[in-house]
Amino acid sequence: MGTGAITGYVDVAQLVLYAFWLFFAALIWYLARENRREGYPLETHTGAKLNGWIGIPEPKTYRLHDGSEIQVPSGSAGEQTGRGERTYPNEGAPIEPIGNPLLAGVGSGAWSARADHPDMDAHGQPKIRPLAVMPGFEVSENDPDPRGMPVIDAKGNSAGTVRELWVDGPEMMFRYLDVEIADGSRRALVPMTFCRITRDAVYVHALMAHQWTDVPATKSPDTITLLEEEKISAYFGAGLLYAEPSRTDPLI
């Protein structure tokens, strides 16, 4: 027998290979199981819960940087968001929103029940604040400053005027535009990802001008919570599909 051989048919290299396969399979199973700490079990339209053969891990408590603790899985589904009905009774059928499709929480307007407090930085301060209260930040002289610019909707109508920018301090980037809507009744935040800024206007094609009145508001004038971020982004996301009937009509 050669060096490393245990028998005429098994050697150390072969055992090491088998051990690696077992380890790698166990690692995949562990990671797949840990991935189910949030969002599981799945639920069918009848309310039946689906755990799958991998199952759900045991609850584990995590201590966050602010000293608070969170346990996942928590056993709570949180605030339910979707208000829709199936177009057909079979599994996988499309869901049509009920009521205002921009607020129904289905399709491109779905959102998660995140914590209702601001995202905090390492110093315990809210990450996202208006530019006016963030010393040391300003709009680059090489870029257009959207403050004072009109906001134009998908039909070319004026939806309002930009009054302020909200900046993410740790990431050093603008997250929202603070818009005074056209009728002057309120202010609304729009995520920068839905904006196209030119030299003379800001274009937001996700919504029509009259739909800005229902954009979810923030509780505080100078902070935004994680839950509020979800709802605001979902509202504009829903607009991409539901702002007007033609967006859901067939192409042909």
Image (cartoon, rainbow, N blue to C red):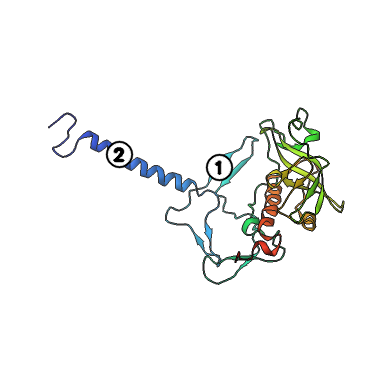
Asked which quadrant contains residue 64, the reply is top right
Q: Are marks 1 and 2 in contact (CB under 8 Å)?
A: no
Q: Say above or below: 170 vs 151.
A: above
**Residue 126 at least partly seen:** no
> Nearer the N terminus, badge 1 or badge 2?
2
- The residue under label 1 is which amino acid type? Thr
Nearest to the observer: residue 171 or residue 147: 147
Q: Quadrant of the C terminus?
A: bottom right
Residue found 48% across the figure and 57% down from its top:
51
Residue found 71% across the figure and 50% down from its top:
232
Give the label, 1 or 2, closer to the camera. 2
Q: Residues within 10 Å of mark 2 (few under 14, many from 20)?
A: few
Residue found 25% across the figure and 37% down from its top:
15
How many marks do you count on the picture? 2
Q: Which residue is mark 2?
A: 19
Q: Say above or below: 171 vs 211.
A: above
Q: Which residue is mark 1?
A: 61
> Residue 24 in the image: x percent, y percent?
36, 41
> Residue 25 in the image: x percent, y percent?
36, 44
> Residue 100 in the image: x percent, y percent?
72, 63
Per the image, label 1 sits on a secondary structure element best described as: strand
